[in-house]
Image: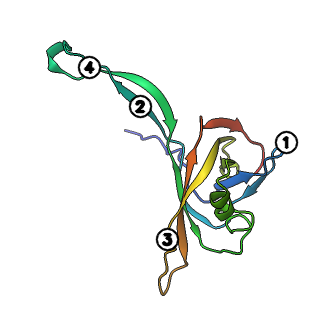
Amino acid sequence: MAGVASTGKTGIGALLQVGDGESPMVFATVANVTQLSIGGVTLNMVDSTHLNSPDFYMEQKPGLKKAVDWTGTIQWDPTDPTTGSATGLTKFLEDRSLETFRFNAFQLGITTALEVDANVSSLGNIEVSPEGLMTRPFTLSPSGKVREVTVSSI
C-alpha cells in the first residue's frame, strides 16, 4: 500500500516579527528566536448546571474565546534593537505597550501569516551554561483575535 508524502515544513526560516505601529505597518524581525509556540485558541466554558440538571451531570455552555499566549525563546543579546531595553521586547514589557506581532513563514512558501496584538507579559530567567548560548524565554499575551493575513515577503 502506497503512503502519502508529508507536506509538513521544518521551522527554519520562520520568523517572529513586530510592527512599528505606523500605517502602513512595517515589520522588523525579532532577532535570534530559537523556538516558538503560537496560534492556539481556547473556548471558556460557562457552568450552566442547575438544581435539576439531567442525570446529576454538570452542564456547560460556550463563553468567550481567548487567544492562547505565544511563547518562545531567544538567544539573549541585550544590545539587539528588537529584544533590548531601548526599542525591543524589554522596552515593550517595561512600557506595558500593546504591540502587533506576526508569525511569518513566507520563506517556507507559506503565504498565510498570523498576526496578533499582544503585550510582552514575561521575560524569563536568562539561561546560562558553560558550552551553550545564553537564552531567555518570553511570553506574549494576546488581546483579541489572532488574525490570518496574506504576506508576499518577509
Q: Distance between the residues labelled 1 and 2?
A: 34 Å
Say the numbered circle drawn on residue 49: 4
User: Which is nearer the eye, 42 or 114?
Assistant: 42
- What crowding class fits label 4: few (fewer than 14 Cα within 10 Å), some (14-19), or many (20 or more)? some
Q: Position of residue 48 (x, y in %)?
A: 31, 20
- What crowding class fits label 3: few (fewer than 14 Cα within 10 Å), some (14-19), or many (20 or more)? few
Name the residue that disc number 1 marks.
24
In the picture, the quarter occupied by the N terminus is: top left
Q: Residue at x 68, y 69 (%)?
A: 84
Name the residue that disc number 2 marks.
44
- Mark 3 or mark 2: name the one nearer the start of the chain: 2
Tag 2 secondary structure: strand
Q: Distance between the residues labelled 3 and 2?
A: 30 Å
* Amino acid at the residue labelled 3: Asn
* Amino acid at the residue labelled 1: Pro
Name the residue that disc number 3 marks.
125
Q: Residue furthest bottom?
A: 130
Q: Which of marks 1 and 4 is in front?
A: 4
Q: Which of marks 3 and 4 is in front?
A: 4
Q: How far apart are marks 4 and 2 (CA)?
A: 15 Å
- Mark 1 or mark 2: name the one nearer the start of the chain: 1
Image quadrant where residue 143 sits: top right
Q: How far apart are marks 3 and 4 (CA)?
A: 42 Å
Tag 1 secondary structure: loop
Q: Residue furthest left?
A: 55
